[in-house]
Image: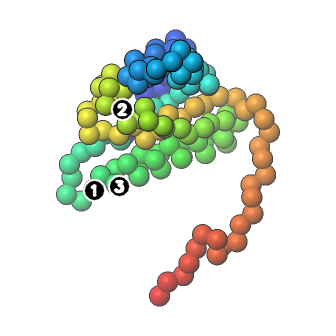
Amino acid sequence: WRFLVVSGEGRERLGQLLVDARAPETDAERDSLRATMLRAPLIIVAIAKMKEHPNVPRLEQVASTAAAVQNMAVALHALGYASVWRTGPTASDPRVKAALGLDAHDEIVSYLYVGTPVVPDRPAPEHALSDFVEFWS
């Protein structure tokens, strides 16, 4: 794993990097894309640094990075912060990866937006175990 922590003016630079890489056609699209990195005061870019390994397939390397992001989100919530996990097309853009110092085969798993909650927690929906679990024998 590798985590890039982006705050302050770095968010503006990252937004401009996305614009430069994706080259939106209109001013409105450029402004919107640039502004995505200003939605929260802190962005954590979670990266799966892929390694050839006979016992750890690519899927598991990405999944373990995703698990780390989920654990960060839970820890942030426990500390009173809010987070939102986003990716979108820029996460797989080779120009974005290169500009962030990634190898072509590395994966951006998440842009985790972190800040102070602006709305109260919603109640968690209730589900039956059977909605998610099936017993197989």
Q: How far apart are marks 2 and 1 (CA)?
A: 24 Å
Q: Residue at x 30, y 38 (%)?
A: 106
The amino acid type of the residue labelled 2 equals Asp
User: Can residue 11 be spotted in the picture?
Assistant: no
Foreground mark, 2 or 1, reads 2
Q: Dividing the image into 4 quarters, which one contains the N terminus?
A: top left
Indicate the position of residue 93 as horizontal and vertical percent values. Answer: 36, 32
* Cβ atoms at labels 3 and 1 below 8 Å apart: yes
Left or right: 37 in relation to 96: right
Q: How far apart are marks 2 and 3 (CA)?
A: 21 Å
Which residue in the structure is indicated by mark 1? 56
The amino acid type of the residue labelled 1 equals Val
Q: Which residue is drawn at 21% across and 52% down?
A: 53
Which residue in the structure is indicated by mark 2? 93
Tell me which label, 2 or 1, sits earlier in the chain.
Answer: 1
Which residue in the structure is indicated by mark 3? 60
Indicate the position of residue 87 as horizontal and vertical percent values. Answer: 49, 38
Indicate the position of residue 35 as horizontal and vertical percent values. Answer: 57, 20
